[in-house]
Image (cartoon, rainbow, N blue to C red):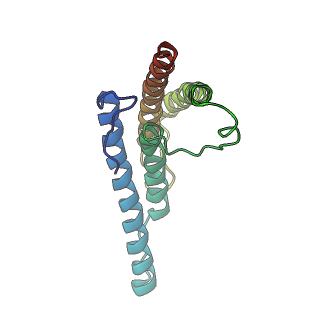
């Protein structure tokens, strides 16, 4: 886990603490996935008795892992970036490109949150359950919605921090 760090010289915020907590939950999901898989393979090979619904549990844990890890990925700026023009532009232009990328990410996460929210509501209203273990599908949607919402907050924090840096750079001679 990466510790919450200041963005743009500012101390860690609630968004940082929330993202850090979600990162821990994502790590727990990864450990659970590994343990379920190892135990399932062991029981299958040694006793010919696999864990019922193991694949379904691993899928649920994967949703937790991915969506709960995204906010911290944004905040630590460890997402995939393609540095095509970095060497062609100055630091201020590079920061503006960073803000543009963050705005695109913000738009994408907002659309995802709206669409996922509708799907989650439909699944809840219909009483959808998983096929093997009969787990309510809302158990899958919850971490996805929380992760997407926290990702939005993380991107807003990054954009505000980067805008402050652009404005400060404009004031210095």
Q: Check the image and name the residue furthest to the front.
A: 173
Nearest the viewer among 79 and 45 is: 79
Number of marks drawn:
0
Up-down relation of residue 8 to residue 137 (above or below): above
Q: Residue at x 43, y 53 (%)?
A: 61
Residue 149's x, y, as percent?
44, 29
Q: Is residue 8 above or below residue 75?
A: above
Task: Give the x, y percent position of residue 112.
Answer: 57, 30
Q: Position of residue 99 (x, y in %)?
A: 56, 26
Say which residue appears at 32% left-offset and 48% top-offset. 24
Residue placed at 39% from the left, 31% from the top?
Answer: 7
The quarter holding residue 35 reads: bottom left
Position of residue 161 relative to residue 151, above or below, is above
Name the side, left or right, on which 170 lies relative to 13: right
Q: Which is more toward the observer, 6 or 69? A: 6
Asked which quadrant contains residue 87, the reply is: top right
Q: Residue furthest top?
A: 171
């Amino acid at each position: 886990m990466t510790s919450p760090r200041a963005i743009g010289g500012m101390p860690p915020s609630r968004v940082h603490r929330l993202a850090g907590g979600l990162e821990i939950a994502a790590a727990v999901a990864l450990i659970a996935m590994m343990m379920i898989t190892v135990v399932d393979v062991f029981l299958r090979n040694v006793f010919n008795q696999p864990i019922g619904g193991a694949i379904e549990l691993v899928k649920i844990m994967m949703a937790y892992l991915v969506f709960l890890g995204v906010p911290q990925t944004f905040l630590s700026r460890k997402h995939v970036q393609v540095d095509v023009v970095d060497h062609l532009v100055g630091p201020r232009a590079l920061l503006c490109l960073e803000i543009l990328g963050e705005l695109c990410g913000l738009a994408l996460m907002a659309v995802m949150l709206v669409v996922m929210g509708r799907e989650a509501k439909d699944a809840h209203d219909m009483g959808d359950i998983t096929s093997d273990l009969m787990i309510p599908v809302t158990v899958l949607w919850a971490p996805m919605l929380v992760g997407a919402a926290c990702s939005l907050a993380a991107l807003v924090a990054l954009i505000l921090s980067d805008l402050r840096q652009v404005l400060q750079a404009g004031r210095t001679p």
